[in-house]
Image: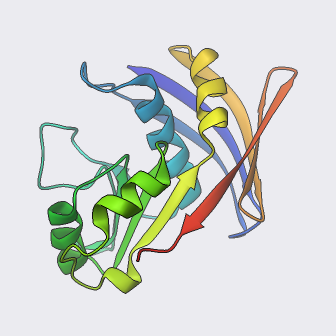
Amino acid sequence: MYKFDIDLADADRHVYDALVLHVARHPSESEGHLVARVLAYALEFTEGIEFSRGLSEPDEPAIAVRDLTGAISAWIEVGIPDAARLHKACKMAPRVVVYTHKDPTQLVGRLAGERIHRAEALELYAIDRSLVGAIVARLDRRMAFALSVADRELYLSVGTETLTGAVVRYPLG
């Protein structure tokens, strides 16, 4: 279990909140994937957001935003999901977002030409890999940091250090 105390200031979306996240890490999950999940949660933070029950639930997104009826309004994946998973997600949710901490051109290449329902509406973002690596190098079971977002540029303050990196949107196809 990891505990993250995040002071979020997202100027792009006008979201300012203090987040306290208790995040379980599956034994097969890399530290980079864990960090990307936490960043994706913060970047998408809104009412109704939640982590899924984990890798053991293949029919659920990594992160979901649910409305008051319990229906999924945003399906958020992390990493490099396959086309079949994204096809299913695009049928189940009005908004589907992927945050990758891997090579985004590899993901775009794998998805090119694949059958994905409403592929034009799919949002694909790449989190700066050097930023993810820098956070992984400082990863601890209990972490507190401030995360500021402006023009999709992330500024993460841990102690006296400030780490920066961009989140870049990639078109599919």
Q: Count the marks.
A: 0
Q: Residue at x 38, y 75 (%)?
A: 122
Whether residue 70 is visible, yes or no, is no
> Which residue is painted at 49% across and 40% down in the image?
36
**In the rendered view, would you say 46 is above or below 135?**
below
Mark yes or no: residue 164 visible. Answer: yes
Residue 135 versus residue 65: which sits nearer the camera? 135
Q: What residue is drawn where x is 47% and y is 29%?
A: 32
Q: Position of residue 63 (x, y in %)?
A: 35, 53
The residue at the point 14 percent across, 64 percent down is 84
Residue 43: x and y in percent read 58, 56
Q: Height in image: 40 above or below 157?
A: below
From the viewer's perspective, tell me whether residue 21 is left or right of residue 132: left
Q: How is the image coloured?
A: rainbow
In the image, is 111 to the left or to the right of 53?
right
Quarter of the view holding residue 90: bottom left
At which x and y percent is residue 15?
A: 68, 63
Q: Where is residue 51 drawn, in percent x and y?
A: 34, 46
Choose top left, top right, bottom left or bottom right for residue 1.
top left
Q: Report the quarter where the C terminus lies.
A: bottom left
Residue lying furthest right: 160
Is 159 placed above or below 6 here? Answer: above
